[in-house]
Image: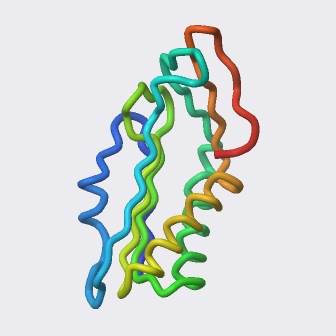
Amino acid sequence: MSVHISIEPEVLNPDSLRKILETEGCGSIVSFIGITRGSEGNSTVERLEFDHWDKELPIALKKIGRNAISLFDVNSVVIAHRTGVVLPSEPIVCVHVSSPHRASGFTACSWIMDELKSQAPLWKKEVTTEGESWKSGLG
């Protein structure tokens, strides 16, 4: 049982991160990759800018991953998040979960994303053709 956390200021490579998972005894890998949308309403999104609490972000993500292992029948969790500027179509966040069965993997992956959105000390500024704004809430 393992949790791997990665905070990436440059490029997030979901395929490389998936290879970190422990898969012994597993029959499932469930993944979620969130990317920057190219539009918001009638505006074109030029970029997202992520700021974070340097010291606390890895701690929060590790706690979420450990809780997922405790709550669900999963063996291994990888959580990675970008910081800085993320352009349209680029990955923002990546969650991989290995589990003996798919149902627990899907449940855990979805739960991890919900927890990340509500707990991770990350802040997002959206820059569009109409201007820029900080999005409310964490994650």
Q: Residue at x 41, y 77 (%)?
A: 2
Give the answer, above or below, for where 138 lies relative to 27.
above
Give the answer, above or below, for where 38 lies relative to 78.
above
Which quadrant: the N terminus?
Answer: bottom left
- Pick out the residue farthest to the right: 136
Q: Residue at x 55, y 76 (%)?
A: 68
- Pick out the residue farthest to the bottom: 25
Q: Residue at x 58, y 24 (%)?
A: 40
Give the answer, above or below, for where 72 lies relative to 58.
below
**Residue 111 or residue 61, whichever sits in front:** 111
**Residue 51 or residue 117, whichever sits in front:** 117
Q: Residue at x 45, y 24 (%)?
A: 38
Q: Tally the marks.
A: 0
Can you tell which quarter of the image residue 110 is in?
A: bottom right
Q: Position of residue 126 (x, y in %)?
A: 60, 24
Q: Is residue 7 visible?
A: no
Can you tell which quarter of the image residue 31 is in?
A: bottom left
Tell me: 86 left or right of 122: left
The colour style of the image is: rainbow
Tell me: 124 left or right of 27: right
- Pick out the residue farthest to the top: 130
Give the answer, above or below, for where 18 lies relative to 107.
above
Q: Is residue 97 visible?
A: yes
- Pick out the residue farthest to the front: 42
Q: Position of residue 19 (x, y in %)?
A: 24, 64
